[in-house]
Amino acid sequence: MEIITAASGNSYIYEQRTGYISLVPSSYMSKGTLSSYYSDKIKYLTKFGLISNKSELEFKYKLLEKKDITNALINTHQIIFEVTDKCNLNCYYCGYGHFYDNYNARKNQDMSFDSFKTLYNYLKDIWITSNNKGCTYLRISFYGGEPLCNFSFIKKAVDYVKNNPIKNKRIVYSMTTNAVLLEQYMDFLVKNNFEILISLDGNKYNDSYRVFKNGNSSFDTVISNIDKLYSSYPAYFIQNVKFNSVLHNRNSVKDANTFIFKRYQKYPMTNELNVFGIAMSKRDDFMKMFHSKTKEFSLMTTDEKKEYENQSPFMHNSEKWVFNTCMKTYSTSLLDVLSESYLTHQTSNNIEIPTKTCIPFSRKIFVTVNGSLFPCERIGNEFYFGKIHDGQVEINFEGILNIYNQLFTKYANICSKCKAKDFCSVCIVSDIKGYEVCSQTKPRNIKDFISFFETNPNILRNIIKTISII
């Protein structure tokens, strides 16, 4: 437990292990010392384990076990199918393009529909036979390449799911698309209530890295198709369509937001170029193209920072911190806390793995065009997680445990004393040598988060509103 003083001068009791946080009014503080009332309160909270009387508390971490991966498969709520590695564009910064060397060669091939049926039925059987039925919905996502280049697969998948429903699972369809073929297939997408993420980097100049195979701009075609969808199905567009803008040296957060909001009344997600898997020979050229959100926000005026605050690089970590501190405390049953020593219970039953790396397949399962399995579409091909072949799903449990636990061991000592535990962004399999950076980096102070939400209580309210039970 520690007393943290925010930029405003307000003091807070904060216990990182349980996420407990409580304002201490200034009238109860005297030269940095708590009044007798709050001293008694701390004794009470310590008794029931919500806080500890130790100022420095090391965290204990466990390594990954097979049951963790099995439970992750049961509870996964998204499957992403790379339905084709074909694409009708030749984007200069593509994650499967010339900058990167950590992916399998693109061979203009389509995914076998047997792969879809095999994995779908594998998971369906798990949910039928397991006492744990997982979450209440399953998001089935289509990815590429450009997924609409293999529309027949998508249609077959939707028809198959309709004819083979999973009891107590609400199916949600989603797709990431460059919108080149959007007009041709939009009636089907609307009919089946697809959630669509459209890649668009801003105006014609901002979007000029997104070109056809012949080098011509795709912008006019894409905008025409988006406009058609907007005018034909306005209610659907408002509800189901989102935009993603990749940042580079021809656009900015402000550019992308200005164009897309003015034309479609939507703010895009903005993401930096993927920095993992860059070929050594391409790093200089890559850095010339790279656009840092952190740097852009540091140069913004106060009003601009306010306007684009939801896309601030600080916002993502702030949300993580809220979910792992405030919400963890207030979602805990008071009866549970008072029935036993909460801290002891937490220590013995909820020891975490180092970093905030996802347990493989806990958030999603990514299936490549050739049937290889990964826990995420952003992970390279350095590791073998599993494969769909010959009508079977093979999960490489032993290999996953070996790789992850070797890497977790390198982080454990660093994580045990790290203040960034609740907003860690490290993925050990995306950045294989990230532990070298972690050991040298001073994380953002907890004070910054508390001060930020004091100044912006509306953002805290909005984060809490986004919580959904799955």
Image (cartoon, rainbow, N blue to C red):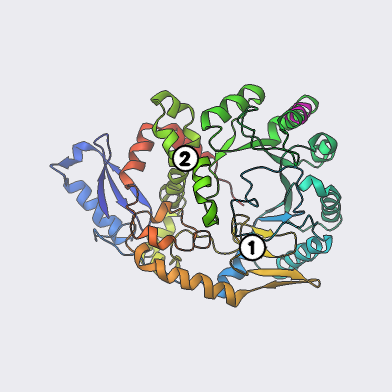
Is 355 contained in the magenta span?
no
The residue carrying pointer 2 sits among few (fewer than 14), some (14 to 19) or many (20 or more) residues within 10 Å by Cα, namely some
Is 224 contained in the magenta span?
yes
Element assignment for label 1: strand
Query: Which corner quadrant of the image does residue 161 belong to?
Result: bottom right
Of the pair 418 and 451, the residue shown nearer to us: 418
Query: Which corner quadrant of the image does residue 258 belong to?
Result: top right
Q: Is residue 432 left or right of residue 129?
A: left
Please state which amino acid type lies under the numbered disc 2.
Answer: Ser
Q: Which residue is mark 1?
A: 374
The residue carrying pointer 1 sits among few (fewer than 14), some (14 to 19) or many (20 or more) residues within 10 Å by Cα, namely many
Q: Is residue 26 left or right of residue 260?
A: left
Q: Which residue is mark 2?
A: 292
Q: Earlier in the sequence, mark 2 or mark 1?
A: 2
Magenta stretch, residue numbers: 223-228
Q: Disc number at residue 384?
A: none
Task: Kindly report the distance in space between the C-alpha atoms of the residues bearing marks 2 and 1.
Answer: 28 Å
Residue depicted at 69% across the width and 33% down the height: 239
Residue depicted at 49% across the width and 48% down the height: 284
User: Looking at the picture, does residue 232 appear above or below residue 115?
Assistant: above
Of the pair 212 and 252, the residue shown nearer to us: 212
Element assignment for label 2: loop
Q: Is residue 298 left or right of residue 65?
A: left
User: Looking at the picture, does residue 6 appear above or below residue 14?
Assistant: above
Q: Is residue 91 left or right of residue 414?
A: right
Measured from the top left, where is residue 218 in percent x and y?
Answer: 73, 34
Measured from the top left, where is residue 108 in percent x and y?
Answer: 78, 54
Residue 408 visible in the current orientation: yes
